[in-house]
Image (tube, helix red, strand yellow):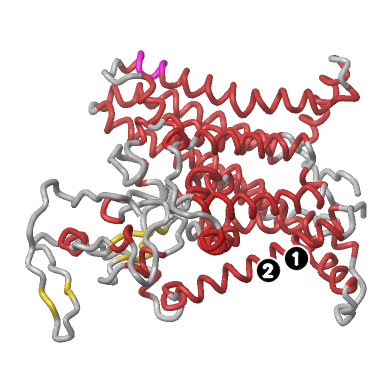
Amino acid sequence: VSLQWARRTPALAIPGGMPVSLPVLTSAGGTAAPVRSASRQIDRSFDLLAIPGIGHLLRDRRVRLMLRGLMLLTAALIVLDGLLGPKASPMNLAGVVPWIHWRGLVVIGLLVGANFFCMVCPFTLPRTMGRKLLPRGRAWPHWLRSKWLAVGLVVAYLAAYEVLGLWASPLWTAWIIIGYFVAAFAIDGIFRGASFCKYVCPIGQFHFVSSTISPLQVKVRDAGICTSCTTHDCIRGNDRVDGCPTNLFQPKKVGNLDCTFCLDCVSACPHDNIGLMASMPGTDLLHDRTRSSIGRLSQRVDITALIAVLVFGAFANAAGMVGPVVAWIDRLADAAGLAQHRWLVVLGLLIGALLVVPAATVCAAAAWGRRWSRVPVPWDQIACRFTPTLIPIGFAMWFVHMVFHLVTSAGTIAPVVQRGLMDIGVTWLGDPIWFMSCCALSPSWLVPLEIVVLGAGMLGSIVICWQVSLHVAGRAGSALRLATPWAIVAALLYLAGIWIIYQPMEMRGMMLP
């Protein structure tokens, strides 16, 4: 092996303030029919659930359960190979599938669809078992009802990936997956809802943040139906299905934050009033509306920190694999007399890149913009409003990095599957074609695509930043001065991304040609 370069809330507020008594009409069969308000607010956007075939499949809970079962089987095979298979990363499912194929497919799915990987997440299956075996019913502790634990876990994951070389250790990868299953089983088996997904899971936090720029959202079709609804099954659940595991009340839900796309609300809604609707990516970031179970983003410093870590983490993760940075770290370790403990230098640099640099950049941009524009808004609220505008450029960097590895190393799964089948006596696929474990040449269209995606990410961040600035400042002149520091940050990140994609990249875990 070598390095090569190349889920019930106790009370609900009825939307609109004071409770209003409404007549309940019943059909001949006695089923309550929704009373539609005179003021109709119908979303006529494209609805994936209304498409024949695929819509029916997605709405069927059994189909979603089957997909999770298939993912569980895949995870089990990866764990078994990681524990019992070859220690060489390119020869092991645990060394190839999670770090190349899964990550690449995730970012593609988030960009062109939605948070579908949370929808089929195998870690949700232990929840059902845990609720049968463990003393379920406790509420998640109040002092943990934030994203701070998740922020720490995201930082720990990104640091461990580099310092411990997770990509090169099938054994470490297998134990991480096992740890995920144990944590999901214990947390969601003891506490109500989906506390693991909402407050703990670092992978889920990446999906939540990134899906703010996805083109699909779980939304109500007709707001008037929700206004007259008295059961609120979408969040309370019923005798057939639980309500939203992350406590998102559909009429008050904004965007995709904390939405696992489990579609339990779709199955629970007695009025068939929830769809998978098309939405302009990033638009839910423009307004500081109160979001169900989340509140206002301008008052959520923890979510701001999570976003900042994920945005800057995209560049730190990619930069740590390019030749000039690797060589510079080596020289720095030699100069510090830490050549035998290079990991200390890497850890220090990662802490700086994931914590110090994002905090300094966000605080400086907020303070500069506030002073220059003279808007009467506290700088911390400015930081919380504008940091989410960097999501597009941050996700763009994740996308180009993960897709690069997927495109150039897609073939690595073939010989690993061949080898795994031979280990159990199945030989009809033939001997492993190990030369496919080496990265392929980068196709001519890949770099132009990466430049376009990074450019679109930068422009997306600047456009959203400008719109947010107009909402905050009101006047165009003040808005321009308020937005300028954030636009500069987006542009600098874009330039950093361009530099990275033109550098030789470590193809970790690949075999020599």
Boundaries of the magenta span? 367-371
Answer yes or no: do the residues labelled 2 and 1 have beta carbons within 8 Å?
Answer: yes
For image coordinates 90% across by 63% down, the residue present is 434
What amino acid is found at the position of numbered circle 2 in the picture? Leu
**Label placed on residue 73:** 2
- The three-letter amino acid code for the residue at tag 1 is Leu
Left or right: 30 as drawn, with respect to 21: right
Closest to the observer: 79 or 109? 79
Please give left or right for residue 425 compared with residue 269 in the image. right
Position above or below: 202 against 234: above
- Residue 124 position in % (x across, y down): 55, 60
Name the residue: 33% across, 67% down.
238
Label 1: how many Cα within 10 Å (few below 14, some 14–19, many 20+): some
Which quadrant is the C terminus positioned in?
bottom right
User: Which percent across, then down, holds residue 90?
Assistant: 85, 56
The image position of residue 510, as x and y in percent, is 85, 52
What residue would you read off at disc 1?
Answer: 77
Residue 218 in magenta? no
Give the quadrant of residue 229: bottom left
Whether residue 210 sits left or right of residue 88 in the image: it is left
Real-space Cα separation, disc 2 to disc 1, in angstroms: 6 Å
